[in-house]
Image (cartoon, grey):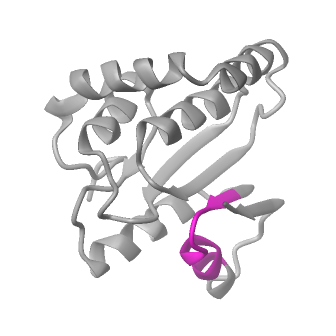
């Protein structure tokens, strides 16, 4: 895991990008938020580490947070729901560091959580509380967090 990501296969990115784009066209409210974020850049300078299902919907959230000026990192909250093509597209086309692959084991799951915490996030977004619990154990200072 020496790179700024750990995914199954970067060659899956083109398929993932098409799926992310399709999902984005169905998410009108998020598109409006993204447009506002592009103008105001209200998250400029913030680092947001996320532990969420790696899906097309989550990808669009990551793209939106980035549009707001945030540095975002993503790891999987459930290795069985990870869409490897989406993870690859986020890395290749959207420059989002992703640490997730479908079927990852317990050891790599927690290594991936550690990887997104190494960024010293200001905010964490977590679906399941493993990221928040690990941040608490390691006494990482945060501005805020949410458990989705």
Q: Quadrant of residue 78?
A: bottom left
Q: Which quadrant of the figure has residue 39?
A: top right
| Residue 29, position as x, y percentages in the image | 72, 24
Q: What residue is shown at x 23% (from left), y 24% (from top)?
A: 15
Counting from the top left corner in percent of width and height, residue 106 is at 30, 80
Q: Nearer the viewer, residue 102 or 49?
A: 102
Residue drawn at (56%, 64%) of the image:
117
Residue 140: say if magenta.
no
Task: Count the numbered circles shown.
Answer: 0
Q: Nearer the viewer, residue 131 or 120?
A: 131
- The correct choice, above or below, for 104 with respect to 73 in the image is below
Q: Residue at x 43, y 35 (%)?
A: 56
Q: Is residue 11 left or right of residue 68?
A: left
Using residue 2 as the reference point, say whether residue 118 is left or right of it.
Answer: right
Q: Answer above or below: position of 68 versus 97.
A: above
Q: Residue furthest bottom?
A: 137
What is the x, y in percent for residue 75?
44, 57
> Residue, x 47% and y 70% (percent of image)?
114
Q: Which residues are magenta?
A: 124-135
């Amino acid at each position: 895991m020496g790179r700024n990501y750990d995914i199954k296969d970067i060659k899956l990115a083109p398929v993932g990008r098409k799926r992310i784009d399709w999902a984005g066209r169905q998410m009108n409210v998020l598109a409006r938020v993204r447009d506002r974020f592009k103008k105001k850049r209200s998250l400029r300078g913030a680092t947001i580490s996320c532990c969420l299902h790696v899906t097309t919907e989550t990808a669009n959230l990551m793209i939106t947070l980035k549009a707001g000026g945030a540095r975002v990192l993503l790891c999987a909250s459930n290795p069985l729901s990870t869409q490897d093509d989406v993870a690859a597209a986020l890395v290749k086309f959207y420059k989002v560091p992703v640490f997730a692959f479908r079927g990852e084991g317990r050891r790599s799951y927690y290594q991936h959580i550690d990887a997104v915490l190494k960024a010293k996030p200001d905010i964490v977004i977590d679906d399941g509380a493993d990221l928040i619990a690990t941040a608490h154990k390691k006494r990482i200072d945060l501005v805020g967090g949410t458990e989705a």
